[in-house]
Image (cartoon, rainbow, N blue to C red):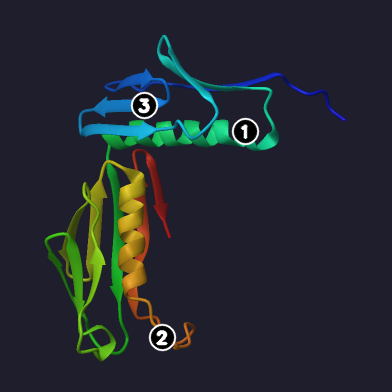
Amino acid sequence: MPPKTTHHEQQTPILEDVTVTVEDSLITVKGPKGELKRDFTHAEVDIKKIRNNIHVSVEYPRSRQIALVGTILSHIKNMMLGVIHGVTYKMKVVFAHFPPTVKVDGDRLIVENFYGEKAPRSAKILQGVTVTVQGDDVILEGIDIELVGQTAANIQHSTKLRRKDPRKFHDGIYVYEKQLGERHWKI
């Protein structure tokens, strides 16, 4: 059995053009695209800013607390990348049966004629996310990766078909590309 550790710590450098302030467990990240705040008081970890690094540590850790240190550090990195580069999700409107009409109305995305339905379907667009419709593409942009991802999930869930075989009926709006800073995923 390996010896128990009494202290676990990880760190990440603060990126250029970013200002990070730490007050207890409240993190504020400011950059050229905006400002993000996140409260980590629920996590029993110690967050400090030392010189040009963010240190996250825990005393007498268990395995879950060690994993939590890495998770919080990833959230802080995503916040820094978001305020510098922004977050972009691209979604594709897919249909084989009836061509739907997609439009933005305030804080809702409206999908009409989805699978020939008379009643329109709608999805909530969270505050801080900009949605544009360009032909069969729906582009979501913002600085908070969690808000952009949740808005994409809202849109995809609003066009879910029930009681149909998903191997045959592919109609819906699906994410096909994600971009956060230098990281770029094609799905």
Which secondary structure lies at badge 2? loop
- Residue 65 is labelled as 1
Q: Is residue 134 above or below residue 19?
A: below
Q: Is residue 80 above or below residue 114?
A: above
The span from disc 3 to disc 1 (Cα, nearest Å) is: 19 Å
Q: Which residue is mark 2?
A: 169
Query: Counting residues from the N terminus, which is met first, the one under dot 3 or under dot 1?
Result: 3
Give, as a three-letter code, the residue at label 2.
Phe
Q: Is residue 126 above or below residue 46?
A: below
Q: Which residue is mark 3?
A: 27
- How many residues crowd around disc 2 within 10 Å: few (fewer than 14), some, or many (20 or more)? few
Residue 4 screen position, x and y as percent: 78, 24
Which secondary structure lies at badge 1? helix
Give, as a three-letter code, the residue at label 1.
Gln
The span from disc 2 to disc 1 (Cα, nearest Å) is: 43 Å
Residue at the location (43% across, 36% down)? 75
Quarter of the image for the C terminus: give it.
Answer: bottom left
**Relative to 80, is 41 on the left or the right?**
right
